Image (cartoon, rainbow, N blue to C red):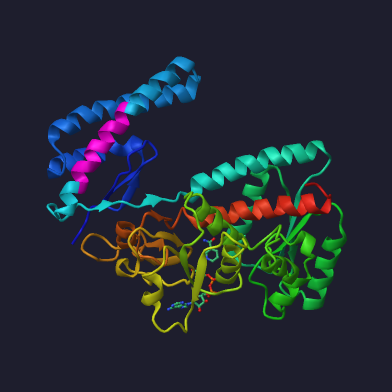
Amino acid sequence: MRNSCVESACDCNSFIIVDGRRRPPSDYRDSFHKLGELGVIPKELVSKFIPLVSLRNRIVHEYETIKNELVYASIKRVSRLFRQYVKLITEYIRGNSKQRKYKEVNLVTAKLLDGEALAGKIKEGLKKEIEELKRKGITPSLAAVQVGENPASRVYIRNQRKSTEEVGIDYQLHELVETTSEEELLRFIEELNWDSKVTGVILQMPVPGQINARRAQMTISPSKDVEGMNPVNMGMLVYGQAKVAPCTARGAMELLRSSGVELKGKEVTVVGHSEIVGKPITLMLLESLMESPTPTVCHIATKDLAQHTKRADILIVAVGKAGLIKGDMVKEGAIVIDIGINRVPLLDEKGNPVLNEKGKPKKKTVGDVVFEEAAEKASYISPVPGGVGPLTTAMLLKNTVECAKAQKQVQ
Ligand code: NAD
């Protein structure tokens, strides 16, 4: 059984995975030591590379502290050398893994689509945009409505508050009692729709059984619909003119576009056809009249899933079943976007469950795609966690800003 997995692209943003853990360049030292010990790369190369890693980390740290031009020039010089070494080492790993010389080492050639980093950049942009809006007297303000108690949405609310405040959006939480009737909730939402200080409204899910969730969500005014779920906004997606759109679908598209790969002419397979993810993604893929790729949508009733995934240049999966997409279902060189979120038991090297201090099995979060297998074939792949998830939050913020701008008629 393979227990180590190595990825290396030839630049400083590259990363490697050893023993299933992603490591940034600052962590290369241990990984390359290990590869030297295994004999995958010559020990002399490791002993030349390690001091370079230390030097690079030291100057990067120094630059972060003093932002000096001279230090910046040294980073560039050392980085160039660093890249040459990484390239050389990559070739060794690639050669050895092609020959299957070292069973425990396997080169993963896919580049990681880093949702965390992309979301960070989007949030930085939004922060500046909100500062500008505030100078014009416009403050994006999100009203969240929670009916009754729910531990899962409590975590969600905490994150919502944190991320809205981070970029400068006003956040207010309205907690309604568990026994709130549907009529009372609809009336409350209508009040928020009319409140000119509120620019966005979000209804936390799930709602208690006496309330029709869809009807309540549809009551949110299309101009304040930060989740992009109102039929008016869904309809605008059909016309390719949506200002706001379902957050996860929009996040997945941002991540896909960040690969820089042209979509025109590509075969895309979307697995999952829910209203919140699969269907809006498909409409977004078809947004452009002439530049669209060709999407195929698969779902629970699809007869032969593998037949569709295997021919996909771009594979987007949103199902909620761990291990659904295996390596042999992925086309060589495909872009894989994994949206699924699943909690599965954490296993040790022998395949036994790892227990926590209370003796209960520990769990980890995985997607719908078997990451290690798919990463061997794909050209780009999004991880779970750290892929589409952070972008879903970023897109909620973006939608909130778009709603505020549209209401105040700012371009
Ligand atoms: P859903 O239950 O509404 O839809 C699931 C879809 O998968 C359906 O279209 C169904 O037909 C299809 N499906 C089920 N079994 C299948 C199979 N064997 N083969 C092919 N298709 C199959 O789920 P959803 O709300 O769209 O969410 C899907 C996944 O995405 C879940 O794991 C969810 O947790 C995750 N998700 C992630 C984010 C995020 O921010 N990353 C946001 C929303 C949802």
Q: In x, y percent, where is residue 79?
A: 35, 28
Q: Main secondary structure of the magenta part?
A: helix
Please check the rendered image and state whether residue 84 is part of the magenta-colored stretch, yes or no.
yes
Q: Quadrant of residue 61?
A: top left
In the picture shown, does residue 109 fall above or below 59? below
Look at 70% across and 66% down and name the residue there: 239
Q: Left or right: 204 with respect to 199? A: left
In the picture shown, does residue 47 fall above or below 148? above
Residue 159 seen in this snapshot:
no
Q: In x, y percent, where is residue 196?
A: 87, 54
Q: Left or right: 266 with respect to 323? A: right
Look at 36% across and 22% down and name the residue there: 77
Q: In x, y percent, where is residue 193?
A: 83, 62
Q: In x, y percent, where is residue 272?
A: 50, 73
The quadrant in which the N terminus is found is bottom left
Q: Quadrant of residue 218?
A: bottom right
Q: Nearer the viewer, residue 45 or 92?
A: 92
Please check the rendered image and state whether residue 233 is part of the magenta-colored stretch, yes or no.
no
Look at 32% across and 50% down and name the residue there: 21
Q: Which residues are magenta?
A: 81-94
In the picture shown, does residue 299 fall above or below 127? below
Q: Nearer the viewer, residue 157 or 329?
A: 329
Look at 63% across and 71% down and name the residue there: 206
In the rendered picture of this protein, how many numbered marks are placed on residues? 0
Q: Quadrant of residue 311?
A: bottom left
In the picture shown, does residue 86 fall above or below 402? above
